[in-house]
Image (cartoon, grey):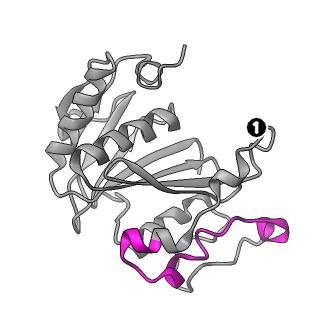
Amino acid sequence: MSGVVELGAFRHDDAGEVARLVVAYAAERGVEARIGSADGGKIADQADVYEPLDGWTVVMWPSTSAEAAAEMAQAVSGRLNTIASCVSAYEDDFWSHLIFDAGRERDRFTSRPDYFEEESGTEHRWISDTAVVAGVFGVDAREITDYLTPLTGDELDDDDRRAHPDDEYALTDAWVFVDFWRRVGITYPDADVPPLQFGVSFPPGWEKAITGSA
């Protein structure tokens, strides 16, 4: 894996409504986003909105800002009064997960809470409460505990350990979020399944306007 991947999954079966809410929230922040058809092709600064599958609509955000992606996901979660599962995967280093329920943050996790250890006070905020996550998704906590346990010590070098024998990715692989999502009922859009339905394009500098940064 190279680069950064920013994803959001909404428990909602209308991709068009999700796309419209993204555009509406961007407009409130002074950003003129536009919805295009799936056949327009991938462009820079575009959020890809995929066809709903099993009750979930997945959005692949532009990879320029995890903070902006999370803020938009939280806003859409609130307006739909539904759950949003937000994933950030960084290079081959680690992955993070945020859950919003009706716009309220319920849990946050990162596989490497010490990665930004120079940021005082951030580590403890990214330790997941697996029982809360299981309750939100309606799954057995035992099915997801290993995914949401931070990697430490020798575990960082164990590239064979998996949460379940049938998982595609090792726990040290940032792409293991694909296996985690599968356990909670969300399908990562791979090989056009589910297919791309809409593209929401943003102008340059959109993320700074969304987050209010300079």
Residue 136 is one of the magenta-drawn residues: yes
Residue 89 spot, x, y in % from top left: 56, 50
Q: Is residue 200 left or right of residue 207?
A: left
The residue depicted at 50 percent of the width and 80 percent of the height is: 141
Is residue 83 found left or right of 141 in the rendered image? left
Residue pictured at 63% horizontal, 47% vertical: 91
Image point (28%, 22%), residue name = 28
139 to 6, vertically: above or below: below
Count numbered badges in the picture.
1
Residue at the spot of label 1: 119
Residue 108 occupies quadrant: bottom right
Q: Indicate yes or no whether the magenta region holds residue 3.
A: no
Left or right: residue 186 versus residue 40 is right
Instruction: Please give the range of residues in magenta.
Output: 134-157
Relative to residue 157, is residue 80 drawn left or right? Answer: left
Which quadrant would residue 95 be assigned to in this image? bottom right
Residue 190's spot in the image, x, y percent?
Answer: 36, 59
Residue 122 point in image, percent of width and height: 70, 45
214 in relation to 68, above or below: above
The vertical placement of 159 against 193, above or below, is below
Which residue appears at 34% of the width and 54% of the height?
9
Indicate the quadrant containing the C terminus: top left, top right, bottom left or bottom right.
top right
Q: Nearer the viewer, residue 156 or 2?
A: 156
The local crowd at label 1, few if under 14, some if 14 to 19, many if 20 or more residues have their Cα within 10 Å, is few
Residue 115, percent from left and from top: 75, 48
Q: Secondary structure at mark 1?
A: loop
Q: What is the three-letter code of the residue carrying label 1?
A: Glu
Please identify the quarter of the rendering in which residue 163 is found: bottom right
